[in-house]
Image (cartoon, rainbow, N blue to C red):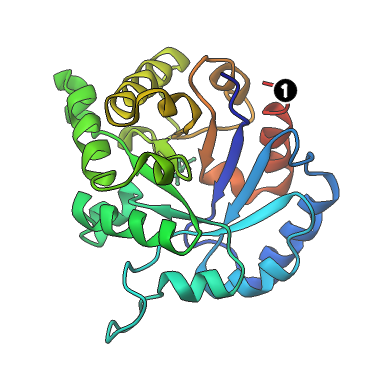
Amino acid sequence: MSRKKLIAGNWKMYKVKDDALEFIYRVNLDVPSKDAVDTVICAPAIYLRDLVKREGENLRIGAQNMHYLEEGAYTGEISPNMIKTVGVTYVILGHSERRAYYNETDETVNLKVKAAIAHQLIPIVCVGESLEIREAGTTDAVVREQVIKAYKDVSKEDALKTVVAYEPIWAIGTGKTATPTQANDTIKAIRGVLRELYNDAADEIRILYGGSVNVKNVEALLSESDIDGALVGGASLDPEAFLFLANAAVDK
Ligand code: PEP
């Protein structure tokens, strides 16, 4: 089963507007064709509208979070229809930073996954374990629970519209990467959970690795059988690094 690779940048709370626009201009010039690899930059919400206008043929723009409700008295929040109406394609859901700092739970992630699908947004559903869990040897069980809860009441047809990102918390922004084998083994375990839920459709759902992916380690990670791309924080801030990662994913 060949799954087209996806390289997704997560800018987090970085870049002022001019840098953001300049980045998109630069990347549009050389980003590989979407026939060969999918690429997306998940930008701060305040720039989404401007960036979507400049997204070009191949590069897509995504959001980093959203509420699950369409509207309401939720000061500071942004709804799925708001990001959809500015033309966003993807949305990162359940990033470990949101789970750690903003009380995101498996239950809210599930509500958001269903809301994203209902608004024709492609959710990038993040799961991953802490260092304590990795060291205790219970990674697969913990990640299994996260996947089962995130996909509760999501049909096979809808699950096929999603992307999973396996991001060990200990590898995010730390410079410590999971080894290609560690990442591939856990991603295989996640695919096993998706197989329990959706049978053979599991082979069509892309599962990315995220955690200190950079120009030096990307080749080895993407050469693994089950790693279908990368969710990239730090290295996605530099247009040349992002282009390198996107090119590394072509024909993998
Ligand atoms: C992320 O933000 O999802 C991430 C993986 O960050 P970094 O690449 O900086 O570890």
Residue 107 % position (x, y): 19, 54
Q: Is residue 177 visible?
A: no
Where is 172 relative to 70, above or below?
above
Q: Could you tell whether 155 is left or right of 133 in the image?
A: right
Residue sitting at 57 percent across and 44 percent down? 8
Quadrant for the C terminus, please: top right
Can I make out residue 250 in this image? Answer: yes
Q: Position of residue 49 (x, y in %)?
A: 63, 74
Q: Residue at x 70, y 27 (%)?
A: 248
Q: Quadrant of residue 196?
A: top left
Q: Quadrant of the N terminus?
A: top right
The residue shown at (41%, 27%) is: 202
Q: Residue furthest right?
A: 29
Residue 241 percent across, percent down from the top left = 68, 39
* Residue 22 sits above or below residue 226 on the image: below
Q: Which residue is mark 1?
A: 251
Q: Say which amino acid is labelled 1.
A: Asp
Residue 213 as seen in the image, left or right of residue 19: left
Asked where in the image residue 199 lies, by quadrant, the reply is top left
Residue located at (67% from left, 28% from top): 249
Left or right: residue 185 versus residue 85 is: left
User: For numbered disc 1, what is the local secondary structure?
Assistant: loop
Vertical arrangement, residue 97 with respect to residue 243, above or below = below
Image coords of residue 109 (percent x, y): 28, 54
